[in-house]
Amino acid sequence: MRYLILIHSNPRSRALWETLTDEQRMEFGRGHMALGEEMDASGERVVSHGLTDPGLAKRVWVQDGETVTSDGPFAEVKEYLAGFYLVDCETEEQALAWAAKTPDAQLGGPVEVRPILDMSTLDL
Amino acid sequence: MNVTTEVEDLLRALAPQVLGVLVRRNGGFDTCEDAVQEALLAAAQQWPAEGVPANPTGWLITVAQRRLTEVWRSEAARRRREEAVFAADVDDAEVSTEDDTLTLLTMCCHPSLTRGSQVALTLRAVGGLTTGEIARALLVPESTVGQRISRAKAKIKAAGATFAPPPADEHDARVTAVLSVLYLIFNEGHTTSSGQALNRVELTGEAIRLTRQLRRRMPEDGEVAGLLALMLLTDARRPARTRPDGTLVPLAEQDRTRWDRAAIAEGTELITHALATATIGPYQLQAAIAAVHDEAAGPEDTDWTQILGLYELLTAAAPGPMVTLNRIVAVAMVRGPATALSELDRAEPTLGGHYRVDAVRAHLLDLAGDHEAARVHYEKAARRTLSLPEQQYLTACARSLP
């Protein structure tokens, strides 16, 4: 069963980040590295990435067959996705346990766990 | 069938035999398994171009043994042992197919491993699939599968497992674990059979093949026969269970002329024989239910009384939320939706908020003619399912109500 662990960034978590010392920020980065290694050792990490600043986001839509892009308005959004881990676990409890281990959750930041929509079917 | 496919099928069939010989000769399941994997890869590259050797098993054993020896060369302490072993010729008596397959299966499904690791290791060590093929089949990265396999082998080693059939007092529990891993592999393939990328190893076929091998070793075991029958009777409906666009066709609406009659005949014969001769168990009961569905010419010909009786037995043998819900659906067909709805009300507190409670309730309300309430529950079930085809199906049900 696969789960997406979404790490959000909001004004509260950003304010908290500002209060951290350089050493604490280094520790935070090392925490993500260590978590990734631990997930790999268990064979449960599918993929994970941190995302760039939402100011770099482009909005894409298709109008009359033409692709149109523009900047933002994501730069002004208060809460946005900052990174994710896709894990493949036996149980939801295990996915929740990984989420709790993210340095973000450890600092009290907003972390969300969503089950992935799969292709399974049951004969009805 | 092209040459490459023929070679791959042959290699998958030979993989457990070769591994069995190597482990019995040398010990060390983990290193032997790696060596066999390399021999299989070498064969997969060479045989399609150069032809299959006269003694393919001997070829694989020799190449794998040579690889193993290369590994040992770097470990001086093992030199003497290596020379003694390498001098040995391949002896046909060493190749005892069926026993090795069962021993390998119970080893790969060792209780110290997680289900995910058991699946990956079984597919590689017994199924003869490469790590890449397993990764594509399970839709996870190759490194993840590699990690699971090496972790699984380390755990088996740490648990002190030896290459021997499980002790008598553990035999039944270990075979039960093997059956549940094989069924998991089958379901993994069965549930993802639509709209998938090319070059995906077909897991349903693989699970059926491995279960056949197990049955050859344990022909009298009713649950082994029951599982094989269940797989055949379920897989028989595959041509009719999805539309070309990948959406789900429920059993009652399937074009039954597209069902695989040969698979149904084989599955029905297997389950009929097992029920008459063996101790009854959950796989046999599920296969018997599948057989009753499969033998009905149309949905209106389904013998729901018999299905309800089988679900009563299954409820006693292996209770669970899915069994409870399926039994209630059968109750509706035999005693009417009102009775089934009141049974669902009584059962609901024990079903732990399972999303299918809403799907079943919607279906029962639909049968009872309460379309407005049915729509509400179909929509709720669609929001709560974890499956895309099921979500599409439930949404379509909600929309098609009058």
Image (tube, rainbow, N blue to C red):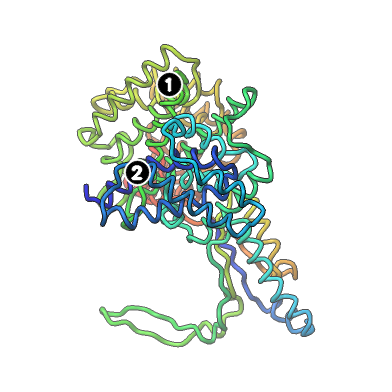
Q: Which residue is mark 2?
A: B56
Query: Which chain is mark 1 on?
Result: B
Residue closest to the far top: B276
Q: Which residue is mark 1?
A: B219
Q: Position of residue B215 (x, y in %)?
A: 42, 26
Q: Nearer the viewer, residue A15 or B261?
A: B261
Q: Is residue B125 left or right of residue B26?
A: left
Q: Is residue B128 left or right of residue B73?
A: left
State whether residue B373 appears in this view. Answer: no
- At 39% from the left and 42% from the top, the residue drawn is B58
State the quadrant of the C terminus of chain B.
top left
B303 is higher (above) or lower (below) than B51: above
Element at badge 1?
A: loop
Q: Nearer the observer, disc 1 or disc 2?
A: 2
- At 35% from the left and 34% from the top, the residue drawn is B234
Q: In terms of image quadrants, where is residue B232?
A: top left
Q: How far apart in space, not on screen, are marks 1 and 2 (Cα)?
A: 27 Å
Q: Position of residue B133 (x, y in %)?
A: 41, 54
Q: Amino acid at mark 2?
A: Pro
